[in-house]
Amino acid sequence: MYKLSFSDSPAAFGTMEANHHRLRRNAMNKFFSSKALDRYEPHVHATFDKLIERLSVARKTGEVVRMTSALKAFAMDIISHFALGQSRNYLSEPDMGHRFQISLLSATSLMHWTRQSGLLVALFKRLPMWMTPILTEAPDDVFNDTHLILDPRKLTDAEREAAFGRKSGKDESVEGEKGEFSAPSQHDSLMSFLKDSPQLPPEERTPARISNEAHAMLAAGVDSMSNIFIVFVFEILREPPSRFLEPLLTELREAEAELPHPAALIPYRNAEKLPYLNACVREAMRLIPGVLGRLPRVNPHEAMMYPTTTADEKGEKQQQQYQRTFCFPPGTVMSMSLKDMLWDAEAFGPDPRAFRPERWLPEAGGAAAGSPQRARMERCFVPFSKGARSCIGLELAKRELFVLCANLFRRLPGLELFDTTADDIDPAFELFGPVPWEGSRGLRCKIRDV
């Protein structure tokens, strides 16, 4: 499923064999470390300032802002700079990258076809560009972008130049070692970092292989992040200000005392310590998992034992229940959707689909730290999956989330919803990630002066 869903990409995400996956992932770990990303945070701040600058224009003109496009552009500008060494600058485009976003959705719509057959994967890779909008139903004026998404070898010359120092399209191996491995701070992109990595053999450091790794980051780092931004903004604004917005702003204003001046951004390390903000971010992450589809796992070596408490075999309602244990032999494919854990009523209460930050705050009636209920909540809180195959971008995601969520309403206190309902936000179907219904206009806002 992983190989075919993602066009048989040689990126770590779709690597089947465990040792091969470990090799590829370990080579990236240092670049995604918390220490490395602390040094990258100024770029997140600069991109956020650019977002606010763009939205401030709408405040002056009174126009309706397509916030879904703005927040997706914010995410893409960050992840493209991180992966490629230069931002794609969608926040500077008139439509804030809306055309690209249509392309991304159009390309993703082929996933349920390609995962059925390797022949389809090979066919789509070899299609002429003019056929792409026909198959994806993308508008004619976005087919170039769609083709680039379908084929990660189609990085722009500038992007290849930034990563490899040349415009060549050849897949030349990066031979030899670079001496002592330089720290992540000495590399401006993931592609550059991997190109110089002594942890990878030469065949793993070809431009084609590394381009696929960067392409996987671009695909994973836009919708998964922007969906959380969108839910956060929508849920904070859909209720009267006294419900969520005012408590949040009160906490944020208190945090301003630690800033060099009130106009400075609240950085990640400060923001993550704010209890109410942390609870709001957790709820947004919980309500919209980055992956809605199932994530298959296989243990090829050992049987897996699964104990569960079930009702009586005859289905009769009885107070007393008993435990059964199922044994799955080695090689059994097992999977579940992250939403089954994130929306688990036994863990999060009878209202698991509700945005309720209080469930994380003991002083507001939530589960107390150290209690069995809190332990169950923490165990089921897996928005980025868990284990060796969990999302490698978690630390980058946290910086994006907390910088945006801690500062958006401080900078734009007049932000309000415009003709947006839950139907425009909630996932309606699955294209690996969650997708709203086809007629959704997304999150739209107006910004009034206050």
Image: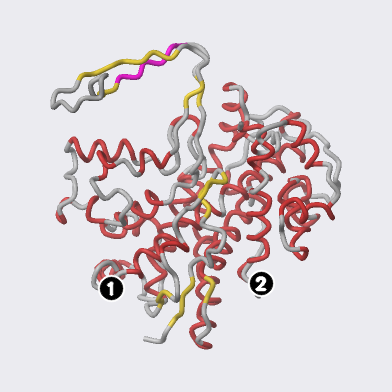
- Residue at image position (52%, 49%) is 429
Reading the image, the residue beneath label 1 is 240
Q: Which residue is mark 2?
A: 93
Magenta region: 302-307
- Measured as percent of width and height from the top left, residue 78 is found at 57, 58
Residue drawn 60% across the image and 52% down it: 82
Q: Which mark is residue 140?
A: none
Mark 2: which secondary structure?
Answer: loop
Q: Quadrant of residue 264?
A: bottom left
> Is 113 contained in the magenta span?
no
Q: Magenta span: helix, strand or loop, mainly?
A: strand
Residue drawn where x is 44% and y is 62% of the image: 423
Q: Quadrant of residue 311?
A: top left
Percent x, y of residue 188: 64, 52
Residue 127: x, y in percent?
83, 45
Q: Residue at x 35, y 19 (%)?
A: 306
- Relative to 28, residue 326 above or below: above
Q: Is residue 120 above or below residue 67?
A: above
Q: Nearer the viewer, residue 413 or 338?
A: 338
Amino acid beneath label 2: Glu
